[in-house]
Image (cartoon, rainbow, N blue to C red):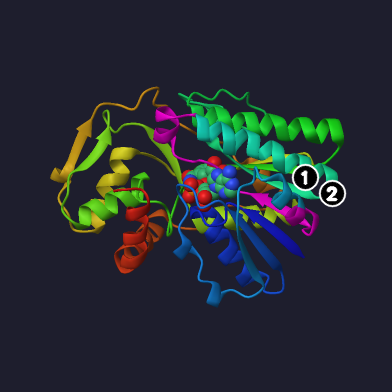
């Protein structure tokens, strides 16, 4: 089987490639990544992975994309601008990668009659006070990032309905684990706490997210790739809803650091209060549920960032931190 992973130098894409090659060593994997924010060349050790080819390029480059899609069986699209704060400062790159990029992929997939797995997010459902969104919930995004991801979902669905192409959408909650850019909450807290630096938290820190270990997410994507139904979407969550301040306090406790490092800042514009998804569909139809324990995975994640100094240095340099 030949798999084209787009955005595979980023956090989830790189973990996915590593897991995929462990589980299916005979698969041929090509990774197309433009080396934009979130990516890190050190995320994948080419010497440790067999049957792997890296291609530096943009999903909007139709020539490159067309060639790679034509040679693949399945395309798994992780490529996206993924940081909400960046989307508030400048939405344009989000439109380019997350909407126009998906359009390019859809055109190539349509032409060559291939299968596409589009990786989406719980943020497309917007802020929910009480409910947990099922796959049938209406999309109600509030940031330029989530709006671009919701637009991508609509494009994917329109191509499935109009042209009959083979697509599946997965939506996941907040991921954590190794190889995530230090501009995201958990790595940022770990790396600042290590140096006893102040930890900035938006607003009151009461915003709620459902946290899933990245390897659980990758496992769910593999399940969907091979057993998911054409034209369907699957929510992937782990029923582990926590407010941001609790997550930060847990990290500080595990690292033996004082909660006095926490420093509340002006809230993010349009900050969604709570994301929540119901993932009964993937559980009942594909018999998948997350298995990682939050505390254990969080400890492993902390150790990974403390042990991988070269990786951290490279990432901080890339994002000018
Ligand atoms: N991180 C999360 O908690 C989370 C949760 C749910 C869904 N997602 C989705 O999962 C996917 C991966 O997220 P992530 O956290 O790994 O993001 P990331 O920012 O770490 O990685 C994104 C990767 O995509 C690449 N990329 C961006 N635009 C590109 C383009 N036009 N052409 C080629 N490559 C491009 C970047 O270089 C980077 O390597 C995204 O689609 C995101 O919306 C993320």
Q: In the image, residue 274 lies at what x, y percent?
A: 43, 30
Q: Is residue 80 magenta?
A: yes
Question: Could you say which is closer to the camera, residue 121 or residue 151?
Answer: 151
Cβ of mark 1 under 8 Å from ligand 1: the answer is no
Q: Residue shown at 49%/23% (left/top)?
A: 142
Residue 240 coordinates in the image, percent (x, y): 44, 44
Q: Which residues lie in the magenta part?
A: 67-91
Q: Which residue is mark 1?
A: 108
- Report if the CB atoms under discs 1 and 2 are less than 8 Å apart: yes
- Mark 2 lies on a secondary structure that is helix
Residue 257 left/right relative to 227: left
Query: Considering the image in quadrants, where does the N terminus appear?
Result: bottom right
Residue drawn at 71 percent across, 74 percent down = 26
- Vertical position of residue 78 compared to residue 157: above or below: below
Image quadrant in which you'd find residue 205: top left
Left or right, 231 with respect to 178, comes to: right
The percent position of residue 208, horizontal first and vertical second, equals: 39, 34
| Between 238 and 70, the one nearer to me in the picture | 70
Judging by the rendered image, the residue that carries numbered circle 2 is 112
Q: Secondary structure at mark 1?
A: helix
Evaluate whether residue 132 shows in this view.
Answer: no
């Amino acid at each position: 089987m030949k798999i084209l992973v787009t955005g595979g130098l980023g956090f989830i894409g790189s973990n996915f490639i590593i897991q995929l090659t462990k589980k299916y060593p005979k698969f041929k994997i090509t990774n197309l990544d433009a080396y934009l924010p979130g990516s890190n060349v050190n995320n994948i050790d080419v010497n440790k992975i067999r049957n792997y080819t890296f291609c530096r390029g943009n999903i909007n480059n139709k020539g490159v994309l067309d060639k790679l899609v034509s040679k693949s069986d399945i395309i798994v699209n992780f490529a996206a601008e993924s940081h909400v704060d960046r989307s508030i400062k400048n939405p344009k790159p989000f439109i380019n990668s997350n909407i126009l990029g998906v359009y390019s992929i859809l055109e190539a997939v349509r032409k060559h009659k291939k299968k596409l797995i589009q990786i989406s997010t719980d943020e497309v459902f917007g802020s929910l006070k009480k409910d947990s969104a099922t796959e049938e919930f209406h999309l109600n995004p509030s940031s330029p990032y989530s709006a671009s991801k919701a637009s991508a979902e609509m494009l994917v669905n329109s191509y499935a309905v109009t042209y009959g192409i083979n697509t599946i959408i997965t939506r996941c909650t907040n991921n954590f684990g190794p190889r995530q850019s230090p501009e995201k909450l958990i790595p940022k807290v770990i790396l600042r706490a290590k140096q006893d630096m102040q930890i900035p938290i938006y607003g009151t820190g009461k915003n709620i997210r459902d946290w899933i270990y990245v390897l659980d997410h990758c496992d769910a994507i593999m399940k969907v790739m091979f057993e998911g139904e054409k034209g369907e979407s699957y929510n992937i969550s782990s029923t582990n809803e926590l407010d941001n301040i609790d997550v930060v306090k847990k990290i500080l406790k595990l690292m033996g650091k004082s909660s006095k490092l926490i420093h509340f800042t002006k809230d993010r514009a349009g900050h969604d209060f709570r994301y929540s998804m119901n993932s009964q569909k993937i559980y009942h139809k594909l018999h998948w549920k997350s298995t990682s324990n939050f505390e254990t995975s969080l400890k492993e994640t902390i150790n990974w960032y403390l042990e991988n100094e070269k990786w951290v240095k490279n990432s901080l340099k890339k994002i000018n931190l």
